[in-house]
Amino acid sequence: MKKKELRNQQPNELKKMLSELRKELMQENAQIAIGTLPKNPGKIRHAKRTIATILTILHKKEVPGNE
């Protein structure tokens, strides 16, 4: 999802998406921990970046006077 699309989302939708991404990342990391190779290694990097972007957007929305 693009940053512009994420900015237009409501905070509760972003939090739901954040929890889903964290679960997905945890599953991918668990696969690596038990020794199996992930199907798509780039998925982990993408999930981490998207989580960081969502957290940044949520923080900007919560801080008053910051647009």
Image: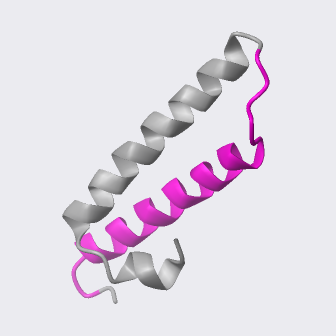
**In the rendered view of the protein, which quadrant contains the C terminus?**
bottom left
Quadrant housing residue 62: bottom left
At horizontal 43% and vertical 81% (from top left) the residue drawn is: 5
Measuring from the top left, give residue 20's x and y in whole percent: 39, 45
Residue drawn at (33%, 67%) of the image: 58
Quadrant of residue 15 within the rendered picture: bottom left
Left or right: 41, with 66 as reference point: right
Determine if the magenta segment contains residue 57. Answer: yes
Q: Which residue sits at x=65%, y=55%? A: 46
Q: Is residue 29 above or below residue 16?
A: above
Q: Position of residue 27 (x, y in %)?
A: 54, 27
Any magenta on residue 50?
A: yes
Q: Which residue range is magenta in the image?
A: 36-65
Report x, y in % for residue 59.
Answer: 34, 67
Does residue 26 sit above or below 30 in this rendering? below
From the viewer's perspective, tell me whether residue 38 is left or right of residue 22. Answer: right
Apparent side of residue 38 relative to residue 14 in the rendered image (left or right): right
The secondary structure that dominates the magenta segment is helix
